């Protein structure tokens, strides 16, 4: 990787891979929402952004927490093709909402599919050293250029 954009793209690609690995690609909307911003100042930052619900996908949801909006569940049911009859979809959405309120997310049944939380944490752990090494290499080259440019001026 030669620049901050390549590092930012690498990070969001790795987050997307982990979401898919954990079977969190119902609509692809969360994956599509992941983006990066580069803030240059005294220090350069690469900020990663995504839809707000990404935090619940990462951490799960405690039982008894604020209810999941029914409309979000209705959309999820339709997109997964679980049910198409509107009356049944709404009924299912309320049942799922109640289960999430009672059990949290992931629910007991969804754990059978494998690991379902920590996509951010797992990705960071997996790629942290590579990103640090790439950033260190870039900074080293930037410092070398500054020294060369300074030497040319004197």
Image (cartoon, helix red, strand yellow):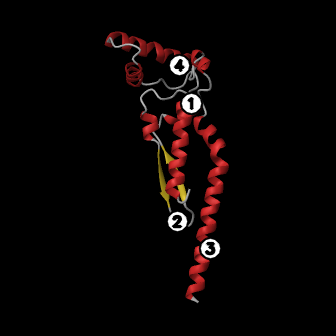
Q: Disc 2, disc 3: CB below 8 Å?
A: no
Q: Nearer the viewer, residue 120 or 100?
A: 120
Of marks 1 and 3, which one's residue comes earlier in the chain?
1
* Of marks 2 and 1, the one in the foreground: 1
**Residue matched to label 2:** 41
Mark 3 highlights which residue?
144
Q: Which mark is residue 139?
A: none
Q: Position of residue 136 (x, y in %)?
A: 64, 61
In primary-sequence order, the first of circles 2 and 1 is 1
Residue bearing mark 1? 21
User: Distance of mark 4 from mark 3, alpha carbons?
Assistant: 56 Å
The reply to whether residue 96 is visible in this rendering is: yes
Cα distance between the residues tagged 2 and 3:
19 Å
CA distance separating discs 2 and 1: 35 Å
Q: CA distance from mark 1 to mark 4?
A: 25 Å
Q: Residue at x 61, y 19 (%)?
A: 111
Q: Sequence-wise, which precedes: disc 2 or disc 4?
A: 2
């Amino acid at each position: 990787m030669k620049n901050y954009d390549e590092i930012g793209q690498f990070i969001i690609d790795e987050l997307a891979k982990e979401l898919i690995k954990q079977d969190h690609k119902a609509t692809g909307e969360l994956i599509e929402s992941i983006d990066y911003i580069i803030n240059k100042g005294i220090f350069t930052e690469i900020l990663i952004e995504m839809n707000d619900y990404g935090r619940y996908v990462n951490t799960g949801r405690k039982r008894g927490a604020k209810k999941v909006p029914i409309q979000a569940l209705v959309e999820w049911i339709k997109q997964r093709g679980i049910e198409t009859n509107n009356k049944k979809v709404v009924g299912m959405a309320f049942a799922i909402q109640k289960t999430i309120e009672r059990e949290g997310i992931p629910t007991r049944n969804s754990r059978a599919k494998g690991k379902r939380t920590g996509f951010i944490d797992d990705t960071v752990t997996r790629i942290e050293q590579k990103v640090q090494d790439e950033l260190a290499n870039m900074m080293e080259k930037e410092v070398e250029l500054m020294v060369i440019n300074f030497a040319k001026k004197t």
